[in-house]
Image: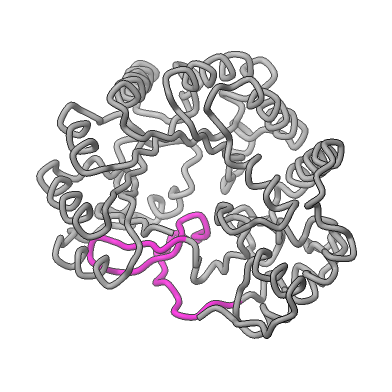
Amino acid sequence: MPTELRPLGIQCNLRCCYCYQKHQRDAEVISQPYQMEMIKSALGRGKASFVLFGGEPLLVPETDLEDLWCWGLHRFGRNGIQTNGTLINENHIRMFKDYNVRVGISIDGPGELNDARWVRSVETTRNATANTEAAIRRLCKENVHTSLIVALHRKNATEEKLPQLTIWLKEMDQIGICSVRLHILEVDDPLVQKEYALSTEENIHALLHFSQVERELKRMSFDVFRDIRRLLVGRDGHCTCCWAACDPYSTASVRGLEGTGKRTICGRANKDGVDYVKSDTQGYERYIALYISPQACGGCKGCRYFLMCKGQCPGTAIAGDWRNRTEHCQVWKALFEHFEKEMQAEGNEQMLSDELRRVLEAELIRVWSTGHNISMEHLLQKVRKPLPLKLPE
């Protein structure tokens, strides 16, 4: 996985109402000035490429962006950025092309559907959204690899709003967007819960709606549905990090790096407003505990889909307590059930049997108890070809 490089920390030109970095802003976390040599030194010690992250990384001066991307291209052969897209200009687009920058854009839809990504007033918010929409179209026209992240909430994914969001996503498919990540809203504030969060039933309806829309698209796919299909047959090697038994103190799938060279964890697991240093060791106490704890107590005991889901992201845990399973448990169960039935109807012969799931669960618990993690793919290789299990370094 690439390193998430945050030269400016959480500094951003927007004030998205539901942002998971709100705790840090409320704590008035002040980013230290970034130092390019320290950034390059820290990145150079690893083998993974990096994605510029934020806050909003396009607030970094363009001369420094070019310096960093030129270095990244020579060091890793590619670059990446995750941006809200409001600040993209002609020079940025040139650099994206010159330095092989893959661009991820966070936007929740056109016009009013994106109003939760707030900029001072309705007028300035709509203007910022229009800038992002224009940037997406320009990037596709220039053949810059572009993907989208769309958060689902009451402004864009209620029964009333779904048709408009669907039309827009179909337009994005037509102009060349190939990949979209749909996010269930991560809620850390009661006001956000009341104003923006969809109900369990609404989240299920919206996601199943888009699973059907996906069938009508020319090139676009939603990675959440691809992940679930892969998980149901034990092919989890390329699934997103929320399914990978993430330790909230080390977040192995997210290597955060600040502009001072400090290593940090994934911001989604940060509930205290403190930018914790990344732990050098990993622990899987959460997942062992979830496996044996009753569902009535926040655990996952007896869940048919524990092997695939593992309680999901600790950043979405019930009551913000990473020891609990995700607060969206019923949504994910519904999706796993839907795709399992769909794949069974298609006659998929790779589906994991109940007996095989129990064997893999027992082996996974054993591996976690040693302080290691392992993919289902490797577990299946061990079960089908009884060889000594080599734990990851």
Residue 155 location, quadrant: top right
* Camera-nearest residue between 385 and 28: 385
Residue 98 location, quadrant: top left
Q: Is 391 above or below relative to 7?
A: below
Taking the image as shown, residue 94 lies to the left or right of residue 347, namely: left
Task: Judge whether residue 224 can be spotted in this image.
Answer: yes
Task: Judge whether residue 191 can be spotted in this image.
Answer: no
* Camera-nearest residue between 197 and 177: 177
Q: Is residue 265 magenta?
A: yes
Residue at x-position 59% and y-position 45%: 187
Residue at x-position 17% and y-position 59%: 33
Query: Residue 316, image x and y in percent?
Result: 62, 52
Name the quadrant of the N terminus: bottom left
Which segment did they paint magenta? 254-283
* Camera-nearest residue between 351 and 320: 351
Q: Is 346 above or below relative to 57?
A: above
Taking the image as shown, residue 209 lies to the left or right of residue 51, namely: right
Residue at x-position 43% and y-position 24%: 176
* Outermost residue, left side: 63
Query: Residue 145, image x and y in percent?
Result: 36, 35
Residue 298 location, quadrant: bottom right
Taking the image as shown, residue 309 lies to the left or right of residue 262, namely: right
* Outermost residue, front side: 385
Q: Is 294 above or below relative to 90?
A: below
Query: Residue 58, image x and y in percent?
Result: 24, 40
Q: Is residue 178 magenta?
A: no
Query: Residue 386, image x and y in percent?
Result: 75, 79
